[in-house]
Image: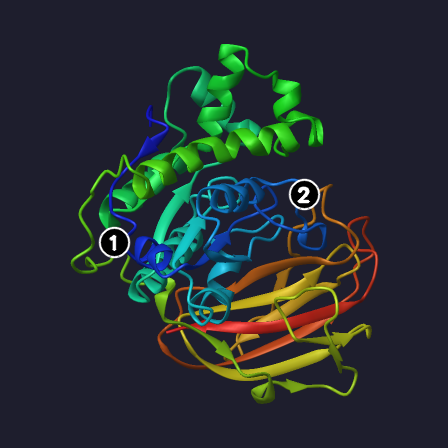
Amino acid sequence: MEEIILYRESLKKTKEALKNNKLVIGFVGGSITAGDENTGGLNSNWPEFIRSYFLLNYPDVRLTLINTAIGGNGTLSGITRAKKELIENKCDLVFIDCVVNDGLEDIYKKSEEGLVRLLLKAGIDLAFVYLFARPQYNYISSGKNYPKVEYMEILANHYNISSIYSGLYAYKAVERGEISFETWLPKSGGYIHPDFAGSFYYSKPVCEYLNKELGESNHNLPSREKLPEPILKDNFENIYEIPADTIAFDSTFVKIREMRSTWYKWQYYSPANGSKLSFKFKGTTLICSLNFGKRTPLFLCRIDNGEWKEYKGQRDWWVPDVNWITVIPFAENLENKEHFFELKTLYRNEESFTGTEFKLYGFSGVV
């Protein structure tokens, strides 16, 4: 993808909202997009400059921002909260950042397409924003397409979604000498996290996109006529929340009001080694949302009385001891019928396992 911005479809709903002086914008993504340190975000992020753009150019518009991005997450986390946070709050426009944290595995492709279809069915305008992490460098510097960007462009073309390669824009700014690499990415050893200047450069092509789509130089792109057939028929558009009152918790669990994360109302907490829960669910996929960290124990899970399988969760060097909000897929490609799920925890005497604190937000199924 050599172009920084690819225009594909009119921001019809956004234009209508601006005429009515009331606009709701949502964001999905990881730490570069996240709006608060409480969710693994940065003090300065590029959505802040999008807020400034509308404040300066549309001062009479009542603007609402819903930033659902969480550090270390992407569309798999975003889709579990999309109905409640983005659709029920009537977003007009949603920016999706997923190139950094979503891989090329099927689970991410299914969550990306499922999220796109959920939001488009709700009549929401979409735009992909491709940000940067160091694994992209060798591709960009040699003029090659980064594989994840290449896949997202397949999705963008299929659904006529405009895409903005903000990471490439910032890279080219370094090539031109406008900023240094160190100014762009001073945090995490120049690997991923921008500071104020880097976030500003990520926002510049997004603002250019908005200028051409919403301003006097309007592209007059066509509007969507109908939703195309899915690329992946088993995408996650039919995701649903499993009610907590259908989960059988053992007596070690306590229901606690969640005070840290705004995305969840309750936390189900057990510090006991060997705590257990079980429930029935229908569908092909099971996803778990957790308050996770190195103090979280090993999970042992099984479905339909099958073999117990171990789930460690991600335990890289950057994962904190506690309070990383994340999602873990426990099952995929099941037969689409009712299943019985069981989980129990187990302390493991290893460096990346430092406790027994299991903190659950909830489960989602896909039919």
Residue 19 bears which disc, if any? Answer: none
Residue situated furthest front in the rendering: 60
Q: Secondary structure at mark 2?
A: loop
Residue shown at 57%/67% (left/top)?
288
Residue shown at 39%/44% (left/top)?
128
Residue 231 bears which disc, if any? Answer: 1
Query: Looking at the picture, how far across and down is residue 221, in whole percent?
Result: 20, 43
Residue shown at 51%/79% (left/top)?
242
Nearest to N terminus: mark 1 or mark 2: 2
Name the residue beneath numbered marker 2: 42
The disc labelled 1 sits on which kind of residue? Ile
Compare residues 19 and 82 and report the one nearer the observer: 19
Front label number (1 vs 2): 2
Q: Secondary structure at mark 1?
A: loop
Q: Is residue 56 toward the left or the right of residue 292 in the image? A: left
Query: Looking at the picture, how far across and down is residue 268, in whole percent?
Result: 71, 77
Residue shown at 61%/41% (left/top)?
45
Q: How many marks?
A: 2
Q: Quadrant of the N terminus?
A: top left
Q: Residues within 10 Å of mark 1 (few under 14, many from 20)?
A: some
Q: Quadrant of the C terminus?
A: bottom left
Q: Is residue 73 toward the left or the right of residue 195 in the image? A: left
The disc labelled 2 sits on which kind of residue? Leu
Query: Looking at the picture, how far across and down is residue 92, in whole percent?
Result: 38, 59
